[in-house]
C-alpha cells in the first residue's frame, strides 16, 4: 500500500502543475479514477490525509491531503445506508485521533489553513452517514475535547476545537436545513429522507446541548473580548483579542444557522436576548453582521400559533432596538460626511434587512390573523416601525434603501385593499404616513450631486434610473390610494423649484433636474387630466375641424398646463448643467399639445433647441439625443410653427447636416469593415435632422417657389457630394470612406423626402404637391449611384431605404424609376436581402397600388422562379433553415399582398400566364403541408382570394376558363385531406386557424360557383368519400345557409367530432 500511496501522491503533485505537459493529462486521468472508485480507494485516501512522520508532522503534502479529503467526500456523499462496522470503526478512530493530534494539541493545520474548512465538510458528511445509527455520541465525544489540556491557557475552552465544532454545526445546518443549498441540487428522495432523520435525531438527542455549548463558548469569548479591550494595547493582547472575536463571530454564525430548525424555546431565552442585543452593537463589524442575520432568522422562524409569534416579538422588543441603532448609525454616517465606510454601510444594510423581515412578519399578523386582539397588538408594533422604515428608505445608499422595498410594497398593498372596500377619506394616521413616505420618495428621486447623467457608459447611472423607476411604482401605489396627495405634492415641489430658479435663488443641479422631471412625469400620474389640449387648459369641447381656428389663450390652464408654462417662461432650460436642460427638452417634446394652447411658448422653446443649449451643445451625447427630441417636437408641433421660421431654422442647423464618416478600428468579428463603418449611432441620430429639415421645408406648401428653393438648397450640396464620392469609389474598394459617404448621403436624401406628407391616394381639390421635379432628380441621382455601385450591399440597402421614402412622397411621378431600380437591386444580392427586397415590393404595392401593375408584371415571373429554386435547395444548419423559413414567409406575404391590392391580373397576363398553373399547383401543395401551419394558412388565404376572382363563372371580367376544374379536382379535395391527415392535431392552436381558413375557402367556392358547387358537394365529392346521405345533406345545407362565423364554428366542431369517433 505504501508504494501505491507514493504513486498517488506523485500523480497529485504532477496534476497540480500544468507546466508538466508530458504527464499532466495522464496524472489527471489517474487521480480521477482514484476519486471515481472511492468505495475501494478510501483507505488509501484516509492514510494520505492522517498519516504522520516519526516527529509527528503530517507525512504528505497539503495538495495530496486535500485530494484525499475529496476522495473521502466522494465515499461519504450520497451514502444513505450504514457503513459496515469495520469501515466505521477504522474511519472513526482515524478521524478522532487526527482531531486529537491536530486540533487538541496541534496547530489546527496552521501551515495549510485551507484544509480546515475542507476537513469540516468531510467530517460533516461522515456525521450524516453515521449519526443516527452508528455514532450517536458524536457531539458528546466532541464536547470532551473542547476543554483545554493546557492549564496555562487563559480560556476555559480549546479555541481550535471550538471553531471546528462551529464549522461542523454550520455545515450540518447547510446540508439538512438550508433551502437554498437543497434547491441547487437535484431532488433525491433518499437524501431528503436521510436529512429529515438527522434533523429529528439532533432535535431529540443533542439540540439542547449544542445550543448550550454554542452560547457558552460565545459568552465566555465575549467576556474575554471585553476584558482584553480594557487592557493596554500590545501585540499579545491584539492577537488574543482577534482570537476571541473570531470565536464570537463564528459562534453567532453557528447560532444563526440552526435557530430556524430547532425549538425556539432553546434559542430565545432571558440569557440569549441580552447577549444578542449586546453583540448587535459590538465594535466588531463581523460580529454585528452575524448577529443581525441570527436575529433575522429568529424573527422569520415559522411558529404555528400567531400568539406565540406576537409574544416572541414582545420579548425581543426589536422595534425599539432598531430605532435606536438606526439613529446611532445615521448620526455616524452624517459625521463621516463624504467619506464612505463600506463596512459600516453594510451594517446599516443588514439592519434594514432585519427591519424588513420583522415588518413582513408583523404584516402577516395584521392582515391574516383572525384574532382581533393579536391584530390590534401587531398593528401597534407596526406603527412603531413605520417611521424607522422611512428613515431606512431615505438612506443615501441605494442598497440600504432598497432593503425595505418588500415591506413597503406589502404595506401599500394593504392600504390599496382597504381603499377598495371603503372609498371614504383616509384616516389622519395613514394620510400622515403617506405624506411622509411621499416626501422621502421625492427626495430619493434626486440624482447624486456627484453623478454625471450624460455618461451613458456609467453603470451607476443605469442603476439610478432603475431605482427611480422602482420609486415611481411606490408613488403609483400612493396614487391609487390618494391621487390628490400625490398630484398636489408633485405640483407644489415642481413649481416651487422652477419659481425659485426664476427668482434668482441658487439651487443645486439635482434639485433643478428633479423639479423638471416631476413636470415630465405629471402627465402619467395625473389620472383625472384630459387628453390632448384638454390636459393643459380648461376649454369647452371644440369640434375637431374648428380646433385650429380656436384661440385657446383665453382659457385658464390646468395644473399641468401651469407647470409647463412656468417651465418655459422660467428659462430653466439655461441652467448650466446638461441633465437639467436635457430634461427640459425631454419634457417639452413629450407634451407638444401644450404648445397648441400657448403658442407664445413655441419660439422661446425653438430658440433654446437650436442654440448652444440644445443642438449646438458641446457635449456630443447630449447633442445626439437633441437631434431626436428636436425632430419629435417639430413633427408634433409643425401645424403650429409659423411657416416663415422654416428657412431660419434650417439655416441654424445647416452646420449639423454635414456628413461625417467614422471608420471603426478593425476587430475580430466576422463582419467586414464596410458593414461596421455604416453602423454609426451618430449618423443614425443625424438622420432625424434630415427628416426634420424635410418637415420644415414642407411647411412652405403655400409658397411653392420658396419651398422648391429651400428644398434645392438642402439636396443640392448632398447630390454634389454624392457625385464626388461616386467618382472616388470607382478607383477601387480599398478606400471605404467614399462608399460609406455614398451610403450616408443616400439615406439622408431619403429622410429629407420622408419629412414631406405622403402622396394622397386620390388628390383632393386644391392639394399642393411638393416639388416633384426635385424629388425626381434626387431619385435619378440615387439610381445612378446604384447602377455604378450595386456590388456593395450597403449601397443596395441604402437605396431601398431611400426609395421607399421618396416613392411615399412623390407617388406615381417616380414610378418610371422602379424597373431599373429592381433590375439593379437584383443584379447582385445576398440571400438575406431577398426578404428585405420582397418587403420593399410590398411597401411599394401599398403606396402605389395600380401604378405598380407594369412593374410587377415584369418582376413576378423571374422572382417566383428564383424563389422556387432557392426553396428547393437542401437545408444545412439552423441559419440556413431560418433563412428558408423567412424567405418562404415573405414570398407568400407578397403574393397575398398582390391579391389584396387587386393586382391579380399580373399572374394571368400574357407575360406570366405560362407559369400560372405552376404557381397554383405550388400553393395547393403548400395547403397540404401540415408540418408548416403558418404557410398553410397564408396559402389558403391566397387561394381563397383566387377562387373569388378566377373561379367566377365564364363571361365575368376575371373568371378563367377551366379554373373550375382546378377547384373541383384539386383544391377542394386537398382542403378535405388536410383535417384527415394523421399529423393534423386539432388541439394545436395553429391548426385551428388553418381549419378556419379551410372553412372560409369552402364557403368562397360555394358563393362563387353557386348551385353548381352545392350539387358537386352533395352528389359527387361527399358520396365519393363514403359520407352518409344524411350527413352530406346536413353539411351542404350548413355550408350554404350559415354566415361565415357560424360555419367556421360548425366546421370546427364537425372535424373534432369526426376525429374523436374515428
Image: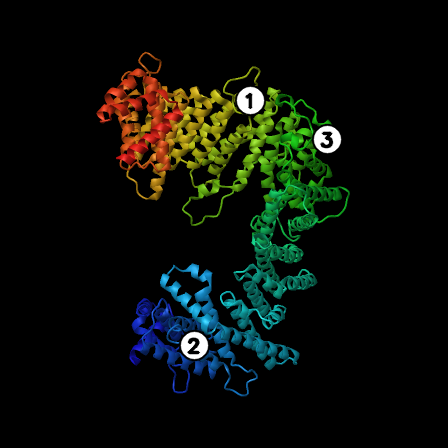
> Mark 3 falls on what kind of element?
loop
Q: In the image, 47: left or right of 641?
A: left
Give the vertical position of 65 relative to 743 (above or below).
below
Give the vertical position of 925 relative to 702 (above or below).
below
- Residue 763: percent from left, percent from top: 52, 17
Q: Distance between the residues labelled 1 and 2?
A: 94 Å
> Mark 1 falls on what kind of element?
loop
- Residue 185: percent from left, percent from top: 40, 60
Tell me the residue that label 3 is attached to: 556
Q: How far apart are marks 2 and 3 (CA)?
A: 84 Å
**Do the numbered discs 1 and 2 sit on residues whose CB atoms are within 8 Å?**
no
Tell me the residue that label 1 is attached to: 770
Earlier sequence position, callout 1 versus callout 2: 2
Residue 285 shows in this picture: yes
Please tell me which residue is depicted at 58% across the width and 41% down the height of the picture.
624
Q: Residues within 10 Å of mark 2 (few under 14, many from 20)?
A: some
Give the vertical position of 925 relative to 32 (above or below).
above
Tell me the residue that label 2 is attached to: 138
Q: How far apart are marks 3 and 1 (CA)?
A: 39 Å
Q: In the image, 591: left or right of 145?
A: right
Q: Which of 439 and 594 is in front in this view?
A: 439
Q: In the image, 700: left or right of 676?
A: right
Residue 830 shows in this picture: no
> Mark 2 falls on what kind of element?
helix
The image quadrant where one finds the N terminus is bottom left
Q: Nearer the viewer, residue 154 or 18?
A: 154
- Residue 508: percent from left, percent from top: 71, 49
Amino acid at each position: 500500500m505504501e508504494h501505491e500511496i507514493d504513486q498517488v501522491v506523485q500523480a497529485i503533485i504532477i496534476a497540480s502543475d500544468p507546466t508538466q505537459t508530458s504527464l499532466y493529462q495522464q496524472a489527471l486521468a489517474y487521480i480521477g479514477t482514484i476519486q471515481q472508485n472511492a468505495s475501494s480507494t478510501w483507505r488509501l485516501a484516509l492514510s494520505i490525509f492522517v498519516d504522520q512522520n516519526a516527529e509527528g508532522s503530517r507525512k504528505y503534502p497539503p495538495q495530496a491531503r486535500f485530494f484525499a479529503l475529496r476522495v473521502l467526500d466522494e465515499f461519504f456523499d450520497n451514502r444513505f445506508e450504514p457503513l459496515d462496522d469495520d469501515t466505521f470503526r477504522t474511519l472513526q478512530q482515524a478521524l478522532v485521533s487526527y482531531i486529537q493530534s491536530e486540533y487538541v494539541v496541534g496547530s489546527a493545520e496552521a501551515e495549510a489553513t485551507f484544509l480546515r474548512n475542507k476537513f469540516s465538510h468531510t467530517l460533516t458528511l461522515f456525521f450524516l452517514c453515521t449519526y443516527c445509527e452508528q455514532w450517536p455520541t458524536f457531539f458528546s465525544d466532541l464536547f470532551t475535547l473542547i476543554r483545554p489540556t493546557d492549564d496555562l491557557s487563559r480560556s476555559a475552552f480549546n479555541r481550535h476545537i471550538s471553531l471546528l465544532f462551529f464549522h461542523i454545526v454550520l455545515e450540518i445546518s447547510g446540508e439538512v436545513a438550508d433551502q437554498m443549498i437543497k434547491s441547487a441540487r437535484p431532488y433525491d428522495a433518499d437524501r431528503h429522507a436521510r436529512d429529515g432523520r438527522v434533523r429529528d435525531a439532533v432535535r431529540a438527542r443533542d439540540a439542547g446541548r449544542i445550543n448550550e455549548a454554542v452560547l457558552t463558548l460565545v459568552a465566555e469569548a465575549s467576556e474575554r473580548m471585553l476584558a482584553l479591550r480594557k487592557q493596554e494595547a500590545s501585540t499579545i493582547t491584539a492577537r488574543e483579542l482577534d482570537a476571541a472575536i473570531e470565536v464570537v463571530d463564528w459562534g453567532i454564525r453557528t447560532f444563526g444557522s440552526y435557530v430556524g430548525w430547532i425549538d425556539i424555546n432553546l434559542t430565545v431565552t432571558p440569557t440569549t436576548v441580552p447577549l444578542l442585543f449586546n453583540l448587535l452593537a459590538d465594535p466588531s463589524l463581523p460580529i454585528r453582521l452575524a448577529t443581525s442575520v441570527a436575529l433575522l432568522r429568529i424573527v422569520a422562524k415559522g411558529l404555528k400559533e400567531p400568539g406565540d409569534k406576537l409574544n416572541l416579538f414582545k420579548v425581543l422588543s426589536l422595534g425599539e432596538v432598531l430605532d435606536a441603532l438606526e439613529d446611532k448609525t445615521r448620526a455616524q454616517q452624517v459625521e463621516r460626511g463624504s467619506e464612505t465606510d463600506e463596512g459600516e454601510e453594510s451594517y446599516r444594510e443588514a439592519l434594514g434587512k432585519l427591519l424588513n423581515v420583522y415588518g413582513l412578519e408583523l404584516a402577516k399578523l395584521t392582515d391574516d390573523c383572525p384574532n382581533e386582539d393579536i391584530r390590534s397588538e401587531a398593528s401597534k408594533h407596526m406603527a412603531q416601525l413605520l417611521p424607522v422604515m422611512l428613515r431606512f428608505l431615505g438612506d443615501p445608499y441605494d442598497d440600504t434603501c432598497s432593503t425595505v422595498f418588500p415591506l413597503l410594497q406589502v404595506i401599500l398593498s394593504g392600504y390599496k385593499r382597504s381603499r377598495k372596500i371603503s372609498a371614504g377619506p383616509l384616516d389622519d394616521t395613514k394620510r400622515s404616513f403617506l405624506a411622509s413616505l411621499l416626501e422621502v420618495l421625492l427626495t430619493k428621486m434626486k440624482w447624486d450631486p456627484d453623478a454625471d447623467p450624460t455618461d451613458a457608459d456609467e453603470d451607476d447611472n443605469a442603476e439610478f434610473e432603475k431605482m427611480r423607476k422602482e420609486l415611481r411604482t411606490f408613488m403609483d401605489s400612493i396614487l391609487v390610494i390618494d391621487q390628490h396627495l400625490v398630484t398636489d405634492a408633485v405640483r407644489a415641489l415642481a413649481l416651487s423649484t422652477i419659481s425659485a430658479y426664476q427668482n434668482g435663488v441658487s439651487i443645486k443641479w439635482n434639485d433643478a433636474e428633479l423639479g423638471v422631471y416631476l413636470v415630465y412625469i405629471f402627465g402619467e400620474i395625473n389620472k383625472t387630466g384630459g387628453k390632448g389640449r384638454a390636459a393643459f387648459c380648461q376649454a369647452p369641447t371644440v369640434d375637431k375641424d374648428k380646433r385650429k381656428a380656436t384661440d385657446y389663450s383665453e382659457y385658464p390652464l390646468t395644473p399641468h398646463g401651469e407647470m409647463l408654462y412656468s417651465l418655459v417662461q422660467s428659462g430653466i432650460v439655461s441652467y448650466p448643467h446638461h441633465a437639467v436642460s436635457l430634461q427640459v427638452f425631454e419634457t417639452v417634446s413629450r407634451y407638444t399639445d401644450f404648445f397648441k394652447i400657448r403658442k407664445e411658448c413655441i419660439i422661446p422653446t425653438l430658440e433654446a433647441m437650436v442654440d448652444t443649449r440644445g443642438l449646438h451643445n458641446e457635449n456630443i451625447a447630449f447633442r445626439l439625443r437633441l437631434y431626436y427630441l428636436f425632430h419629435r417636437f417639430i413633427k408634433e408641433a409643425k401645424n403650429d410653427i409659423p411657416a416663415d421660421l422654416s428657412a431660419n431654422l434650417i439655416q441654424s442647423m445647416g452646420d449639423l447636416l454635414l456628413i461625417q464618416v467614422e471608420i471603426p478600428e478593425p476587430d475580430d468579428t466576422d463582419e467586414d469593415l464596410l458593414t461596421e463603418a455604416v453602423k454609426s449611432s451618430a449618423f443614425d441620430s443625424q438622420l432625424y435632422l434630415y427628416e426634420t429639415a424635410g418637415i420644415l421645408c414642407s411647411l412652405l406648401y403655400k409658397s411653392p417657389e420658396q419651398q422648391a428653393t429651400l428644398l434645392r438648397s438642402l439636396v443640392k450640396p448632398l447630390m454634389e457630394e454624392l457625385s464626388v464620392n461616386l467618382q472616388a469609389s470607382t478607383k477601387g474598394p480599398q478606400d471605404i470612406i467614399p462608399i460609406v459617404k455614398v451610403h450616408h448621403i443616400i439615406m439622408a436624401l431619403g429622410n429629407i423626402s420622408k419629412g414631406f406628407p405622403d402622396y394622397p391616394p386620390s388628390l383632393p381639390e386644391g392639394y399642393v404637391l411638393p416639388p416633384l421635379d426635385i424629388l425626381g432628380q434626387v431619385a435619378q441621382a440615387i439610381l445612378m449611384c446604384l447602377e455604378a455601385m450595386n456590388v456593395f450591399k450597403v449601397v443596395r440597402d441604402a437605396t431601398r431605404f431611400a426609395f421607399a421614402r421618396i416613392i411615399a412622397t412623390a407617388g406615381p411621378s417616380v414610378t418610371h424609376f422602379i424597373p431599373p431600380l429592381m433590375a439593379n437591386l437584383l443584379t447582385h444580392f445576398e440571400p438575406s436581402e431577398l426578404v428585405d427586397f420582397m418587403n420593399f415590393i410590398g411597401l411599394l404595392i401599398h403606396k402605389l397600388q395600380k401604378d405598380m401593375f407594369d412593374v410587377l408584371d415584369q418582376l413576378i415571373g423571374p422572382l417566383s422562379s428564383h424563389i422556387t429554386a432557392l426553396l428547393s435547395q437542401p437545408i444545412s444548419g439552423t441559419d440556413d433553415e431560418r433563412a428558408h423559413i423567412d424567405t418562404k414567409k415573405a414570398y407568400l406575404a407578397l403574393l397575398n399582398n398582390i391579391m389584396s391590392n387587386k393586382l391579380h391580373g399580373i399572374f394571368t397576363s400574357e407575360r406570366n400566364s405560362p407559369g400560372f398553373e405552376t404557381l397554383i399547383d405550388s400553393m395547393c401543395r403548400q395547403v397540404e403541408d401540415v408540418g408548416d401551419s403558418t404557410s398553410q394558412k397564408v396559402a389558403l388565404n391566397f387561394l381563397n382570394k383566387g377562387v373569388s376572382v378566377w373561379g367566377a363563372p365564364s363571361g365575368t371580367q376575371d373568371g378563367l376558363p377551366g379554373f373550375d376544374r382546378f377547384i373541383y379536382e384539386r383544391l377542394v379535395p386537398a382542403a378535405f385531406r388536410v383535417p384527415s391527415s394523421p399529423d393534423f392535431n386539432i388541439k394545436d392552436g395553429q391548426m385551428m386557424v388553418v381549419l378556419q381558413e379551410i372553412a372560409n375557402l369552402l364557403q368562397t367556392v360555394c358563393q362563387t360557383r353557386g348551385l353548381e358547387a352545392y350539387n358537386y358537394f352533395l352528389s359527387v365529392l361527399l358520396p365519393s368519400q363514403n359520407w352518409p346521405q344524411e350527413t352530406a345533406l346536413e353539411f351542404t345545407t350548413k355550408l350554404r345557409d350559415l354566415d361565415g362565423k357560424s360555419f367556421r364554428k360548425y366546421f370546427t366542431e364537425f372535424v373534432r367530432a369526426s376525429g374523436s369517433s374515428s
